[in-house]
Amino acid sequence: MKDRITLLPGSFFNADEIPKCRDANDAFMVRNILHDWNEADVIRILSNLRKASGNTGCSILLVEIALPERTTTDLLKGKHLIDMHMMNMFDAQERVPSEWHAIMEKTGFKIFKFHPTRSISQVIEAKTI
């Protein structure tokens, strides 16, 4: 397993510091990062990852909160209080599945599956398009 995982330092805001995907067996794993940034920065981060993916069919695994779609009832029940916290603290947001689909497709990725976990996070599996 050691030869399949590489942890590297660098900035996802600098595309030149992101390692390039070699083939479709490679994947980027981004955990609890994107919810702390506003949409412009998230697009920049994902676009840099897409650039590093090349045309390899590389995957991206996002471990992020994927809230249920927003409804007035949900807001009244407090299900999206964490979203308001992100907005007030970081000018950022938690996203619902439709928002994840839109932002991923805007940056060259297609979501294939949301994998639930025992926490409030989900693993969002996407590939380059």
Image (cartoon, rainbow, N blue to C red):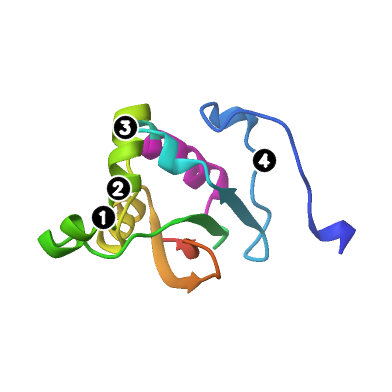
Q: Which residues are magenta?
A: 42-55
Asked if residue 6 lies left or right of residue 56, the reply is right
Task: Tell me the distance, in whole angstroms, between the alpha carbons under discs 1 and 2.
Answer: 5 Å
Q: Nearer the viewer, residue 33 or 43?
A: 33
Task: Tell me the distance, in whole angstroms, between the alpha carbons under discs 3 and 1.
Answer: 27 Å
Q: Nearer the viewer, residue 68 or 85?
A: 85
3 or 1: mark nearer the eye: 1
Q: Which residue is mark 2?
A: 81
- The amino acid beneath tag 1 is Gly
User: Which residue is at the far right?
Assistant: 2
Task: Tell me the distance, in whole angstroms, between the alpha carbons under discs 1 and 4.
Answer: 40 Å
- Of callouts 3 and 1, which one flags the residue occurring earlier in the amino acid sequence? 3
Q: Which residue is mark 3?
A: 40
Q: Are marks 2 and 4 in contact (CB under 8 Å)?
A: no
* Residue 70 rendering spot, x and y as whole percentages: 19, 60
Residue 47 can be seen in this image: no
Task: Tell me the distance, in whole angstroms, between the alpha carbons under discs 2 and 4.
Answer: 36 Å
* Residue 59 rendering spot, x and y as whole percentages: 56, 61
Task: Tell me the distance, in whole angstroms, between the alpha carbons under discs 3 and 4.
Answer: 22 Å
Vertical placement of residue 108 versus 127, above or below: above
Q: Are marks 3 and 2 in contact (CB under 8 Å)?
A: no
Q: Which residue is mark 1?
A: 78
- The amino acid beneath tag 3 is Ala
Question: Residue 19 bears which disc, if any?
Answer: 4
Q: Quadrant of residue 118?
A: bottom right
Task: Tell me the distance, in whole angstroms, between the alpha carbons under discs 3 and 2.
Answer: 22 Å
